[in-house]
Image (cartoon, grey):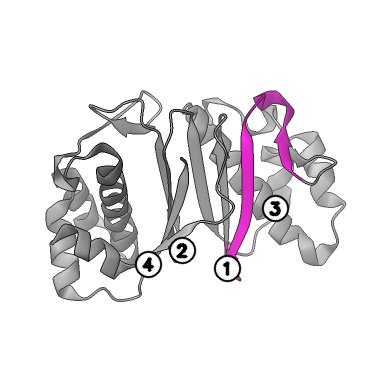
Amino acid sequence: MITICLLQVPEILPEAYWNHFLSQVSAERRAQASRFVRQADAYRSVLGEILTRVTLSKLTGLRPAELSFTRNSYGKPSLSHHSKLQFNVSHSGDWIALISGGADELGVDVEKIAPIDMQIAERFFSTSESQFLAAKPTEMQRETFYRLWTLKESYIKAVGMGLSIPLDSFAILPNEREDWHCKQAGTYLFLSQRLDDGHMLAACSAGGELPSEPEIITLEDLYTELV
């Protein structure tokens, strides 16, 4: 079964929590966290790995610290010894999102909604997507832009080939049932959801059914699983 887990990133993490979480991630992650200028970036990076480890440990039967990861040539992560178990993680702004479960390719993307130059759509979106966006009322264009952007990101993350797939080479648009659909992606399924006033979430599956609602995970949940 495919699940989507969401974790809200706090402005300040209790020191005991932070030190324990740091001790549970890879040395590479700890080194990366130490290089961030902004503490919020370090939080997102470390908590993204913690959420992944805790969630995947339940699916594999291994302890969180026993999990090891590898990446393909495009940077998509997978489990070293459970390569068929699918997962994908994303973080932006106040949220971290993790999709996992099943054997079908999965992708997830969360983005903070910020002011954007709509001309970017002409550069990265397909012609049909740009037309769809332009037809929206002005007050809806920013939300529509981020909905399309996160959907497209979730797809290329699921495929696992990164930006070697040009973003304007495929289109994700609503069909007659108002379901998001990509003609070039065949059987892929899509989900789009606004998390709050400032963030957009999208997910993609190569075949397995996506959940109707994500599961909210708390810091206390993660800490309890690790101690």
* Badge 4 or badge 2: first in the primary sequence: 4
The local crowd at label 3, few if under 14, some if 14 to 19, many if 20 or more residues have their Cα within 10 Å, is: many
CB of mark 1 within 8 Å of CB of mark 2? yes
Q: Say which of 83 and 59 sits in front.
A: 59
What distance separates the C-alpha of mark 4 from that of mark 3?
A: 24 Å
**Rendered location of residue 193, percent (x, y):** 62, 56
What distance separates the C-alpha of mark 1 from that of mark 2?
A: 8 Å
Residue 38, picture quadrant: bottom left
Q: Amino acid at mark 2?
A: Gly
**Rendered location of residue 116, percent (x, y):** 65, 59
Up-down: is 77 above or below 39?
A: above
Left or right side of 166 for 142:
right
Q: Secondary structure at mark 3?
A: helix
Q: Say which of 189 and 39 sits in front.
A: 189
What distance separates the C-alpha of mark 3 from that of mark 2?
A: 17 Å
| Label disc, if present, on residue 93 of the rendered structure | 2
| Label disc, if present, on residue 145 of the rendered structure | 3
CB of mark 3 within 8 Å of CB of mark 1? no
Dot 1 corresponds to which residue? 198
**Rendered location of residue 65, percent (x, y):** 15, 45
Dot 4 corresponds to which residue? 9
What distance separates the C-alpha of mark 3 from that of mark 1?
A: 13 Å
Q: Amino acid at mark 4?
A: Val
* Residue 108 included in the magenta stretch of the image: no
The local crowd at label 4, few if under 14, some if 14 to 19, many if 20 or more residues have their Cα within 10 Å, is: many
Q: Say which of 67 and 114 sits in front.
A: 67
Up-down: is 15 above or below 28?
A: below
The C terminus: image quadrant: bottom left
**The residue stretch that appears in magenta:** 179-199
Up-down: is 102 above or below 65?
A: above
Question: What's the residue at 24%, 28% (across, down)?
Answer: 80
